[in-house]
Amino acid sequence: MNWVYIEDLKDYVEKEVELRGWLYNSRFSGKLIFLIMRDGSGFCQCVVSLNDVGEEIFEKAKKLTLESSFIVRGVVREEKRAIGGYEILVKNIEIIQLAKDYPIGPKEHGIEFLMENRHLWIRSRKQWAIQRIRNELIKGVRDFFYERKFILFDSPILTPSACEGTTTLFDIDYFGEKAYLSQSGQLYNEIGAAAFGKVYCFGPTFRAEKSKTRRHLIEFWMVEPEVAFLDLQGNMELIEDFVSYIVQRVIENKKDELEILERDISKIKNVKPPFPKISYSDAVDLLHKKGNNLLWGEDFGGDEETLISEEYDRPVFVYKYPKECKAFYMKEDLENPLLSLSCDLLAPEGYGEIVGGGQREDSYEKLIQRMEELKIPIEPYKWYLELRKYGTFPHSGFGLGIERTLSWICGIHHVRETIPLPRLLERIYP
RNA sequence: UCCUCGGUAGCUCAACGGUAGAGCGGGUGGCUGUUAACCACUAGGUUGCAGGUUCGAAUCCUGCCCGAGGAGCCA
């Protein structure tokens, strides 16, 4: 039999096909039944008419409960009224299993209930759309770097030392020694940049921060490029090209999914280079003008980020943060030793920081001095320092958080919906 | 860790000191173009747990448990 997927139905108009899937919803109308099947690739209305199929098959259709698995055969028809624009005129139905008491209904549910049932919630239409967009976003990430001849340089997940603060690491027993789950591939990437010029790593990262906000996950995915001989300005240009590419690609290829999410495309269609760029010091002035009384030298919180980003119709760079706000490996600004050659990218609409990056400190002496100031042990970073001994080179890179970027593109309020199975503070089920 | 809000039917909520109720979902019946379909009937409860105040507690008080939102930190 001609088993096809719902997303391909347009190629089978007026032909008889077989669909295999689950019952998403159904509506009865006397001698007519509308079954909404989902098969993973899409949603399709299957029309069962008593006069066409006879009593036996009609009764089967009537018995189907939410999320029952079944196979349906029938003729594909173009139908504007139906979801997706096509429907099946059913000839036969084969029930695989009748599901009993599926907990998630078509009406509203609370977040606690949905999170407890995440393994089932992921089947519903909005969640389906988000994950399809995630897939496109990730393909876009890989294609962008592949087309620009970056080399994929996977960094380890088990690490012996901290990359940033040590308070936010998960520690594990590594044959009697202490090891940690990676919270960034940044430092290892610099090995790759010296060997291959342009590299990126892309994988999960782990932060044991006790953060409980709509922008935080304990386990999240980050893509981190690192480029030899690139300065801060070049880094910002790479970031704006990259972010624009993935946003435009999602708009282009995932129209239906964005529509399911009721995303206002006009809010993201302007995401094209150049992005506005504002220095940290100018940003602080802007905040003061807007009534915020942040002191120079303090890092921005969510409120400050929103105040800055709401000034623009596309993501905005804030660059040259005070050294104290940033990690030890950020290069000092030679024009002002209080500043670092760092840059963050703030997404519009209150989605906050989606990129953090900058130029790295390439002076062996300055790096050692900075580590001593911050009381960071030298020994575990011996290899890192050696990169500055054997042909040091200016280099820059950044990290982009996939889930934050995805919630912004999708217009989803909380990052927990943008990863299939979110790990949150005190939630590791399902 | 701190601050704020919440926990009542399978789900979403109402009742705010005086007999626990609605919508959805479930069940039964009706309807040939439905779009979170609709109409009628029906089943469904130790009001998070423990104690206290009261003639009487879902409601007020105390403690605990669980959840949500936010802060700090970060992508």
Image (spheres, helix red, strand yellow):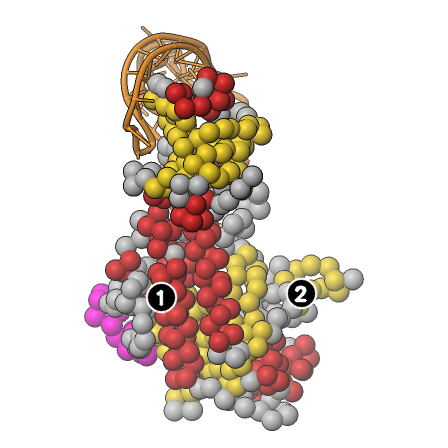
Residue tagged 2: A158
- Residue drawn at x 29%, y 58% as measured from the top left: A265
Task: Give the crowd class for mark 2: few <14, some 14-19, many >=20 residues within 10 Å.
Answer: some
- Residue drawn at x 62%, y 71% as measured from the top left: A155
Among the two numbered marks 2 and 1 on one chain, the one whose residue lies closer to the N terminus: 2
- Residue B45 left/right relative to A163: left
- Residue A427 left/right relative to A297: right
Nearer-the-camera pick, B1 or A252:
A252
User: In x, y percent, where is residue A166?
Assistant: 59, 66
Q: What amino acid is labelled 2 in the image?
A: Leu
Nearer-the-camera pick, B59 or A329:
A329
Q: Is residue A110 visible?
A: no
Q: Which segment did they paint magenta?
A: A278-293
Residue tagged 1: A248
* Mark 2–mark 1 distance (CA, rounded to whole Å): 35 Å
* Vertical order, A71 against A286 (above or below): above
- Residue drawn at x 35%, y 61% as measured from the top left: A251
Nearer-the-camera pick, A289 or A163:
A163
State whether the magenta stretch is mostly helix, strand or loop: helix
Q: What amino acid is labelled 1 in the image?
A: Gln
- Residue drawn at x 31%, y 53% as measured from the top left: A263
Q: Secondary structure at mark 2?
A: strand
| Chain that bears disc 1 | A
Q: Is residue A130 visible?
A: yes
Quadrant that contains the C terminus of chain A: top right
